[in-house]
Image: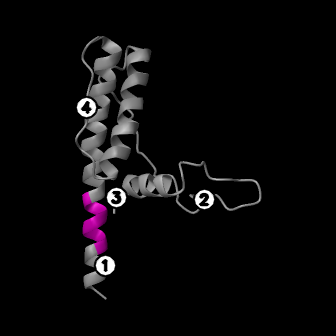
Amino acid sequence: MHYFGLVLLLSLTSGCVSPRLDGHPALFATVPEPIVPLPTVTPFGGKPEARRAYLEGYYLGYLAGLAGNQSLHYDYRSPSLITVAHDMGCTTGSNDGYTARRKQQHKLLMDQTQR
């Protein structure tokens, strides 16, 4: 099951209540935050706001790709450099995250077959 699917399922079954941290173990306390390897070079190196938007999009796209989701939807009603940078980052991040997911699955499969 995909990580985001699990989160959605648990959110729906728990009545969309946030995990409690006051004396009760948090629902996702044992789930580590995935490490997203942000690119050091972007197509928007000379434009700090666009670079920031690209990296934000990359981060979100990578997480989506890591969860197996590559069907991203963009809103082009008000295209701007920031919007384009974000969408480019999201697309690249999604592809990279999906590739990382496939590598993890392959490694897991190889480890299981060697036992």
Residue 29 badge: 2
Magenta part of the chain: 102-108
The span from disc 4 to disc 1 (Cα, nearest Å) is 35 Å
- Circles 2 and 3, Cβ within 8 Å, touching? The answer is no
Residue 111 badge: 1
Chain-order first, disc 2 or disc 1: 2
Residue 73 badge: 4
- Does the magenta segment cover residue 103? yes
- Badge 3: how crowded within 10 Å, few (<14), some, or many (20+)? few
The span from disc 4 to disc 3 (Cα, nearest Å) is 19 Å
Color encoding of the figure:
one colour
Amino acid on which disc 1 is placed: Asp
- Circles 2 and 4, Cβ within 8 Å, touching? The answer is no
Element type at marker 1?
helix
The span from disc 2 to disc 4 (Cα, nearest Å) is 30 Å
Q: Mark 3 — residue? A: 2
48 sits left or right of 32 in the view: left
- Circles 4 and 3, Cβ within 8 Å, touching? The answer is no
Task: Please give the name of the residue rendered at 25% of the width and 31% of the height, measured from the top-left corner.
Answer: 73
Amino acid on which disc 3 is placed: His
The span from disc 2 to disc 3 (Cα, nearest Å) is 18 Å
Assign the C terminus to one quadrant of the image. bottom left
Task: Please give the name of the residue rendered at 67% of the width and 62% of the height, measured from the top-left corner.
Answer: 25
The span from disc 3 to disc 1 (Cα, nearest Å) is 20 Å
